[in-house]
Structure formats: structure tokens, C-alpha cells
Image: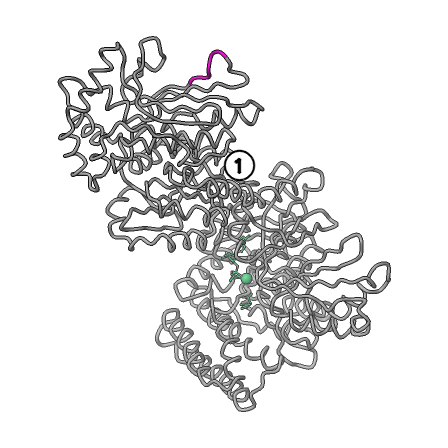
Amino acid sequence: MKVLKFGGTSVGNAKNIQHVIAIVAQKAKEDKVVVVVSAFGGVTDLLLAAAQKAKTKDDSYREMVLSIEKKHIEAIKELVPAHEQAALIHYCKKNIHLLETLLEGCYLLGELTSRTSAMVVSFGELLSSYIIAESMQQRIANCQFKDSRDLIKTNNQFEKAEVNFEITSKNIADYFSANSTQVTVLPGFIASSIDGNTTTLGRGGSDYTAAIIASALSVKELEIWTDVNGMFTANPKLVKQAQPIEKISYEEAMELSHFGAKVLYPPTIQPVLSKNIPIWIKNTFEPEAHGTFISATSQANGNLIKGISHIDKVALLTLEGSSMVGVAGVSKRLFETLSTHQINVIFITQASSEHSICIGILNTEADLAKTAIDTIFELEINQQKINPCSVETDLCIVALVGEQMKNHQGISGKMFSSLGKNNVNIRAIAQGASERNISVVINENNVKKALNVLHERFFEDNTKQLNLFVMGVGNVGEKFIEQIIQQKKFLKENLKLNLRIIALSNSRKMNFNEEGLSLTDWKSELNEGETTDLDLFMERAKALNLRNSIFVDITANESVSNTYASYLRQNIAVVTCNKIACSSQFENYKNLKRLSREYNAPFLFETNVGAGLPIIDTLKNLIASGDKIHKIQAVLSGSLNFIFNNFSETYSFHDAVKEAGVQGFTEPDPKIDLSGVDVARKIVILIRESGYEMEMEAIENRSFLPEECMNTTTNEAFFESLKKHKSHFEKLLADAKANNCRLKFVAQFENGKANVGLQQIPMDSPFYNLEGKDNIVQFYTDRYVDQPLLIKGAGAGAAVTASGIFADVIRIGNV
Ligand code: ADP
Ligand code: ASP
Ligand code: MG
């Protein structure tokens, strides 16, 4: 004999019920089958909601009943031939009428007792099981319905009744031994008390019904059929990468289900465990999939951690005070009073100082628990020996479960550090004495992030997902996206980094996708997006609360740079090529660095100086290893270098500047480059990164631009003025040539002072042969005294800048 249970997710509608019938028909060829079914998907919730409405004298319960009736009649019409429908529809209507009468009573009295509630909710299973049994008879001749209330006997705790196993097991054994039916269909979840009242076994209780029958009949196997491929490593609705677990022990499965793996109702395991009956969890919609096998043994060579589960809507109650120390019986009184009020304790921790006890219960029971606790300790509270019980709600418990955990160190360390890095604050910790689980209490809004972070850490071969929020899709931004598309596979396979762009924005439009934008047609999709709003962009990134979130600024915009602080405060890393923030007031730069440390959110801006060249990173390494920078000499403007390298007697200064713009080497406003402001910003950043305090105003800017060029307000006027002052630029060039020198725009820092300006560079200088748009930096330090540390290479251009931004993103991934 076999026991098969089909949940609400498997019997939501006629089409799904056909799947169920096909599975049962197949099994019935080999063996006798007991089929336990839940209410049609969603019906239990509807029944409970209708009862609540009726109780509060809200007549909308009637519409709910109508929708329940409609759902069942529709299923009947699809499942049984027309000439056999009448009797079944009559059965259905008769029961709906009874339900209406009950609810009418609640409505009139404005009252809903637990006994009535159990009666109301029982109609879900009563209707579904009868309809399914009748439909099954169309295909399986020897098939019968049996009401579980005749067999399963409980106490009068109506909505979560305790089973009397002695009577129940005998009833079941007697009934089935006297019965030769091939397939018997029974309603799950419902039972009756010895004195004949309808009771239920608690939400999700159909699993339990099946286990009770399986145990009473000592069957070979219990099969729980649902809508997923087994028990997963984490809730598959919240963790996309979760995988079905092939084999798991009873204890592990119990632990996972206790901590919220809804696929199995926790009490289900007990009856089958004592008889050593294995449980299969299978998918009704994919019967060929392996499923999960639950038995006495766990997989010996599997992962140490079997799964991660969570319970949301949890409240944490704390009882503390001086009189708790060393006084026996405080915990006894605490737990006794909770038990008297039937409050289920999910989680307990007690500090070894005995100064406080912390317990986790469901949010819905928090008020009741607080009143009960404050009442039982009233005397101590009045004497100020114990504080009134404090309550924190909207929390969530996340538990790591695994049989083998106890034999290995470092698991909790890994768990806490992964959560810590993502700024998930842990409110309380407990480790079961069995060491089969470690559970933490965190804020509910962090649950998805926490589950995914932990899943990545323990199940995904350390693959890390990086979630990018990219602002600015000009030349550099576009290259950056191209590089991501091109490298995605490599990064995943080789660096175990899964890069996703969650949001893209330019100055006009923004586009979000929580699962990651597809990027195949990002330009037109962005055009269709919503209007850009910097605050909204930030708020969305915050609300999504994704792990390893990174804000990438590829603009040259000051307002964008003003938003960094709010990202960092949300533990969202910032990567930027925009120099404005780091060259703004020193106070602001320092504050961003501080926020980055405080909120554990990297703030990286390698491309602020020398595009993709590793200048800032090198500087960081020098300082971190104890070196000290004394002098910096550098050509830091790729655009100015390009311009002065091309400018000649036959190629005008104006044309060289224009060309630099066309090739994407200048800032959108070329005056920022030519005025020396861009170089001043870069040297100030290098000075600050070297550990010195410096403001932009303190940098002497020896500009080579005529006053009139400096004063233009538009790009066109600026280019016109360059034409007009042609001779000024020609003279600069001629003077340099006369001295056998080349013109370079140099930045210098020494003895606490810095300047930027055009210099005539003689042939023997390493700066003389600086080609194209290259940059060069020389650091003179304690260690590099005579020969400076020199970094040289392409210092401008969309591709190299994009790759520098990319490198910063990867740096974050590798932390
Ligand atoms: P049924 O109606 O078949 O009893 P349930 O809704 O009670 O189904 O349970 C199945 C659901 O449990 C799945 O659809 C899934 O969303 C949820 N679930 C939560 N945690 C897990 C987990 N660890 N493994 C599998 N499913 C899970
Ligand atoms: N129908 C009940 C519920 O939704 C029992 C079950 O589905 O297991 O809780
Ligand atoms: Mg269920």
C-alpha cells in the first residue's frame, strides 16, 4: 500500500486535477493507494477571510462564498461528463449552503469561536476530496471516498488539534483491513474530536494527515506531491539559484520545515520517523524529476549545509532585569505562561549571565504574549526587579541546517561575516543543542538579501552576484556595457562573479529590472523608460535591497556626485569616474571615505586619475605598506597631451582641440581640460590619497589660456575664441621649439604645495617622449628616493576608462 498526498498547489483547478488523476492511475496499477488531498489552492485562505468578515459584520463574506462555490462548480463541469454532474453539483451546493448558514450565524452574532472556525475551514477539504474522488472514478473503477473525520480522532483544540494516536491508528488499520478498494480518497487537514466536533490539524496539516495514515498502515513509502521538485536548498520563490535536495535525513527535514520550509508541515515527520517510513517529495507537474528522499540517513558526502530556511513575521520578546540572575524558576514561569496561552516559541536565547532571556514568536501572538508575561511577573516588575517585557516586531528568523555542521568549525563565522558584509544586522543568535542548525534573527526587510547571500556562500561554489546601478551611458558608459556583455561568461566561469545591471540611466530616462536588464536592446529599452530622477533612482536601489549593490557613476555631473553619501549609507558601494566628489571640499571627500568605512561599502574612483591606469590603487598600496609620498610630478591630462602632441605649425590649436573632443578624450565641456581645472582636480585627488589635506583653491593654476577664452560660456564661443587667439598658441609652440623643448601640461606637488601649468619639457626628461594621449606619474617616496616610481600609459579614452571602472567593480567582487 502507498500513501500519496496532493497539496492545494496540485489541485488548484480541473487541469491540475487531471495531472493528479494520471499519477494516481499509474500508481494504482501496482498497488493499493491512499490519496490524501488538500483544499483547492487558495480556498482555505478564502474561507478564513470570509469567517473574519462575517465576524466583523461585513457582508462581503457572501461574495467570497460565491467565488468558492464558482470555483468548485467550474471544476466539476470540466472533470465529469455532463450526465453525471447533477449529483456532484447538488453535493457541492448542499455544502455551500451549510457553510453559508454557519457564516450567517457568525455575522448575526458578531462572533467566531475556534470551534466554528474549524468547521468553516473544513469545507475546503470536504469539497475538494469528494469532487476529486468522483472524478477519479471516471478513470479508476475501484475508487472510493472516505471522510477522515471518521478515522482521525483528536482533542478539542479545534484549530490545531492533538491527535489521539491510539484510537486513530486502530480506526485506520481496521478500516483499511476490512476494505478492498484499490484507491481511497480522503480529505487532508480535517479530523474530529471524540465527542464528534470537526477539528483541524493546523495550517498545512494535510501533510500530517497523510503521515498519520502512512504510519498506521506501516506503508513502504509516503509521497508528498506538490508544485516544486522537492525540498529545496532555500525557498525557490526567494532564491532563484536554490536547488532541490536529493536526500536528507528526517532530522534535517524537520529542522528545515520547523524554520519555515513550507513544503513540509513540521509535525509530518514524527509519525513516519518512528516507523522508519521514508518520505518522497515529488512534483505533480514534473513527475519524472527526482524529488527529495527523506529517510533516517543524510547524504554522507553531500554539502555540510543542507538548506537555509526562514520564518517571517516574527517578534522578539526580551525579558531582563537584575532579579533574573541566579533565581531558579524564572524561565519555568515564562515558558509555562506561554504554553498556557498556546503561544508557540520558535526561538530562544539566554545570555550566560542569565540577565536576559530572548524568545522569538509569531508577530500575531506578540500582544497576547506580552500581556501574559507582564501579568505573571507583575510583582517583580512593580518592585523594578524585572523590566516589563519588551517587544520588537517585523523580524525574521533565518536558519542554516545541516547534520554534519557539528563536526566542522567556522560555519557560523562564515554566516555572520557574509551577512555583516552586506550590512544585515543580526538581532539575536541561537544554535540548537543538536548543532543541526544555527539561526539568526534579522529585520524582515533584509530577508531576501540574507537568504541569497547565504545561499551564494554555502551552495554556489562561492559565486557572487554583483548588482549594478549604472548612471551615465555616454561614450564611456556605452563601452562599459559592451565590456560587461563581452566578459559576463568569463567572469562567471573564472572569477565566480555574476554581474548584473539592475538599472541604467542617462540624463533623461531610467530603466530598472530587479532580475537584471537583458542588455540585448538596452538603448531602445532605456528610451522607453521613465523620466530620470536622481532621488527616485537611489530610493529604488535602496528598496530593492539587493546584495552586493554597486552604484556606478559614469557622468561628469555634480548633482550625481552629491548622491554618493546616500548610497554609501545604504551599504551600496560607489564606483565613479566622475572627479567632482573627490576634488570637492576636503571635508566632503573625508566624509565619503568615512561613510565607506562605517557602512562597509567600498568607494572606488581609480578612473579619476589616469583613466584605466592603476595609479590610485598603487598609491593605496604604498601608503598601506607604510611608505610616505614626498613629491609627485605628473602629466595627468590625456586630452591636453593629445592636443599638444598634435598641435603643429600645420595643424592649428583649434583643430587639435576639436579632434580630441571627437575622439572622446576631453570632458563634455573642453574648457574644463584646457583651463587646467581637470588636472588640478586630479592632482588634488592624488595628494589627498597620499594622506595630505588639500583644497582645490590652494593649487596654483598657471593657465595658458587667454582671458577671453576662459570667459566664454558656451562650447561654440569657446572654439571661436581659440580660433581668434591662434597666434597666442602659435607663439607658445614656437618658444618651446626654439628651446628644443616640447609643451606638456604638468602637475607638481612638493613640500605641501602644488601647481599645474604648461611647461617646456627638455629632451632628457621622461616626460619629453610622452606619446598620444598618454599619462605619466612619478612618485618620490621614502622607498623610491632617487628613481621615482613611474606609471605611464594611455590616460584617456572611452575604452580604457570603461575598463578602469570595470576593474573597480571586479575589485569589489573580489573582496
Ligand atoms: P502544497 O499546497 O502542495 O502543500 P505548499 O504551498 O504548502 O504546497 O508548499 C509548497 C511551497 O513551499 C513551494 O511552492 C515553495 O514556494 C514553498 N517553499 C518554501 N520553502 C521551500 C523549500 N525549502 N523547498 C521547497 N519549497 C519551499
Ligand atoms: N488546506 C489547508 C491549508 O491551506 C491544509 C493543507 O493544505 O495542507 O492550510
Ligand atoms: Mg502544504
Q: Position of residue 379 (x, y in %)?
A: 81, 74
Q: Residues within 10 Å of mark 1 (few under 14, many from 20)?
A: some
* Ligand 3 in which quarter: bottom right
Residue at 54% of width from left, 54% of height from top?
Answer: 447
Q: Position of residue 466 (x, y in %)?
A: 45, 41
Q: Position of residue 102 (x, y in %)?
A: 54, 86
Q: Is residue 790 above or below residue 114?
A: above
Image quadrant occupied by the N terminus: bottom right
Residue at 79% of width from left, 52% of height from top?
Answer: 352
Which residue is under mark 1? Answer: 462
Residue at 35% of width from left, 11% of height from top?
Answer: 765
Mark 1 beta carbon near ligand 1 (under 8 Å): no
The three-letter amino acid code for the residue at tag 1 is Asn
Front residue of this view, candidates 224 and 439: 439
128 falls in the magenta region: no
Q: Is residue 478 above or below residue 67?
A: above
Q: Position of residue 546 (x, y in %)?
A: 47, 49
Q: Secondary structure at mark 1?
A: loop
Res. 116 image quadrant: bottom right
Front residue of this view, candidates 689 and 288: 689
Give the magenta part as a residue range.
786-790
